[in-house]
Each structure stands twice: as C-alpha cells, then as structure tokens.
Image: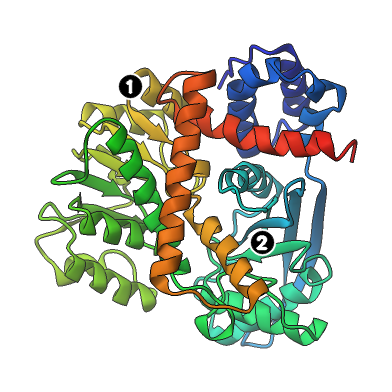
Amino acid sequence: MQYVIKNDYCKRVWDDVSARYADQGHFLQAVGLVLETISPVVDKMPELEKFAVLERFVEPERIIMFRVPWMDDAGNARVNRGFRVQFNSAIGPYKGGLRFSPEVGLDVLKFLGFEQVLKNSLTTLPMGGGKGGADFDPHGKSDSEIMRFCQSFMTELCRHIGADTDVPAGDKGVGGREVAYMFGQYKRLRNEYTGVLTGKGLSFGGSLARTEATGYGLIYFTECMLKKIGKDFTGKTALISGDGNVAQYAAEKLIALGGKPITLSDSSGFILDEDGITEEKLNYVKEFRSRREKIDSYVKKYPSAKFFKGEKPWGIKADFAFPCATQDEIYLEDAEKMVKNGIWLVAEGANMPTRAEAIEFFQKNKILFAPGKASNAGGVAVSGLEMSQNSERLSWSFAEVDAKLKEIMTNIHDNAYETAKKYATEGDYVAGANIAGFVKVAAAMVAQGLV
C-alpha cells in the first residue's frame, strides 16, 4: 500500500520508520494511515518538528519482553513469551488490553498500542496508550492451566504496572476469568488492593456495562453517523463478524434500535439467518459461547439458518457491516463484494479489521466508514470509568455507566466529524479521528519537553 503523505516532515518520519520496521506490516499500516491523514495539521504546527514529536510518537516509550514458564495438567513444563508495549503516557498512565493468542508478537502489539494512544485520547479521559499479552493459546486449556499461566504471567508483569503507571485490561483470549486470576496474583504479590486491571468481576471492583461497552458503543457511534444523514436503524440489515462480547452486544443494541443482524462468525465460518437474529436467538448464542462451542451450534438449534464453513460473511447482501472479530478481516476483494452487494456503511468493532487498500476503496465509493479507534472506543471508555469508580471507592448503576458511555461515544463522533470538516473532507471519519486524537497527545508532548 502506497500512502499519500504530503507534509515533508511526516514523509521523512515515514521513510525512516518504514525502513526500520519493514517486517512489521500491521504496525506500518497503522502508522502510515495516521501520517497520511495528519499532514494538514502538522503543516500548522511547526513546533512538532522542533521537539521531534513525530519521531517520538511512532516509537514506544518502553517495550518489556519476558518468558512465562508454567506447568500443564500432565506435569509438563511449558514456556511462552510475554510482552507489554508501553507506548505513550503523555496524557495519562498507559492503558490497553492484554491479548493471549498465538499471533501475539511485537508487530501486532505495537500496532495495537499505537492505535490505543489515539483511541484513548479521543475518549477525553486521562489515559495513555499501551498493549500487551502473550503467544499463549487459551483454547483447549483447563481452568487450572489457565490459572497457572495467568499467575506466572502476572508474576513478571506486576513489576511494570500499577494504578498510576499502567492499567491493563482484557482483549482477545483474555476475559473475566483471566483478568480475575491475574488480579488475584497481583494483589497477592504486591499486598495492595488497587484498580490495576479493568474488566474485573463486579464483586471485586468491576464496572457494570463493561462487558457490553464495546458493542453498545459501536452502535451508539453508528447511530450518530446515521443521524448526520437523516437515517436510523429501522428495518436495516447488518452483517456482523465474530461471536464474542463485541459482536453479541453490538447485535443486542442493534436489535433494540430496530436493526436486523443476519450474520455472526468465528474461526470456523459464519452463520446466515435471513429471518434475523432475534433477542431470543442471541441469548442462545451467549449460552453456547459460554460453553466454548463453535458457531455452527446456532444452525443445530435454528435449522432455517445456514452455516458457511471456512468463509467470511462479506459476500452477503445487507445495509451495514460491523467487523467485530480481529484484525485483517476485510481485504480489497471483500470490500469489492460488499459494495457490489449494497453495503453502504461499515463501522469497525475490532481493531484494524479493514486493510488499508479496502479502506481506500470504501472511501472512493462514498461508503460511510468508521475506524475502530473511534467506533470501538466504548470498551476503553468504560475501562476509564471503572478506574474512576475504583479511585473513588464507588460503584455506579448500569444506567449511569451506559449514559456516560453514550455521551462519550457521541462526543467522539462529533469531534471526529467536526475535525474532518475543518482539516480534511466532511464525513471522513478516518482523518477526523486521527487528527483529533493526535492533536491532544502532540500538545501534551510539546508541553512536557523532550522526554
């Protein structure tokens, strides 16, 4: 992918970073898209070059790598690699999830951490950006194995995190169970009870609406996009990928607002229910997902639906598409199918699920497109609210948290929209989100000096 970077300073930084990290494709896509879109504002801020802001902006402040030894149920010693990329703390302590998945390495974590810096900035909450995890696959592991791994992982990670330093959360492969095991080990080792992790259980400092937050926030953001053009969800069909928390709660809120989700997916394929995934059907998805069953369980219960083994849902006719599974879900050929089949709005529920060339294709074809750093910021927004509740030793009601979430997502939308209108093209949410997020972080970096 060739990025059109017009500002000389941005171009110089891009040439440097793309040569240095030529083997880190995900990270380079994230950086390239940002440098391409922030050029207009960099033109107006000459102080950025004086303080080497861009050179610092694309480099993590700290990368921690460590081994994670653990024992499986058969008594075999196992070793995985653990990571924490502490990317930028200009506006607050590092904040970002932990991912347990075989794909985890520096490329994936640097792209996630870089995106997290801008995402957290957009929420307006005082949070910097970071990401971490391990190349450990929790699938097929017993609860005891998961616990032993999480305890070993936290034994090292606890040295580098804290409520005012770095506050991790869950991500792919890390749910409430894993967060609880890690929190327990942190408390045990540090002899302190602080809000050092978010996504905790409700009985020990977690926030109501955290589980729902990313999915609900995605739909709240999309609702704002639709209002801008005088439309709503009523009667509209939607393709949703994934079947985890983000996908489930995006579907739940979509149904509540009159929309009709017709697909869900996992690594084995996708299901199509042309009658629509109802609240009752969605409850069944939550039930079989809690047993860690695959998505084809849906078809066994509802035989009028179809299962497409090993395929993605992007070739199905619909109005909206919500990629909610993982990165690299939508390539150019997928985007071409989607436009051909009538998709006119795409909002990302996952982190960078759309390849750069597909984003370019959507924009050229006037498809409304929301980047994940804006549209999926609901999860980290409520994580920030969980941090506030922990600090105040308070617990807010579901309605209070949900109202704050909706307000934050509305503000993110409006900020991205107005920023795009000012610096780029009205309705270009990619440019709007990148510039709005960057300006706040850059101003803090300049103010704090060369650090």
Is 199 or 325 nearer to us in this picture? 199
Q: Nearer the viewer, mark 1 or mark 2?
A: 1
Q: Quadrant of residue 34?
A: top right
In the rendered image, the quadrant that contains the C terminus is top right
- Amino acid at the residue labelled 1: Lys
- Residue 402 visible, this orientation: yes
Is the residue 440 above or below the residue 106 in the image?
Answer: above
Q: In the image shown, does 88 or 287 lie closer to the viewer?
A: 88
Query: Residue, x 26% and y 64% (percent of image)?
Result: 296
Q: Secondary structure at mark 2?
A: strand
Q: Is residue 415 above or below residue 39?
A: below
- On screen, 20 above or below 389? above
In the visual, does 45 lie left or right of 27? right
- The Cα–Cα distance between marks 1 and 2, rounded to whole angstroms, is 37 Å
Residue under label 2: 133
Secondary structure of the residue carrying tag 1 is loop
Query: On residue 172, which mark appears?
Result: none
- Displayed quadrant of residue 72: bottom right
Q: Label 1: how many residues lie within 10 Å, few (<14), some (14-19) or many (20+)?
A: some
Relative depth, front residue between 440 and 2: 440
Q: How many marks?
A: 2
Say which of 413 and 366 sits in front: 413
Q: Position of residue 196 (x, y in %)?
A: 70, 71
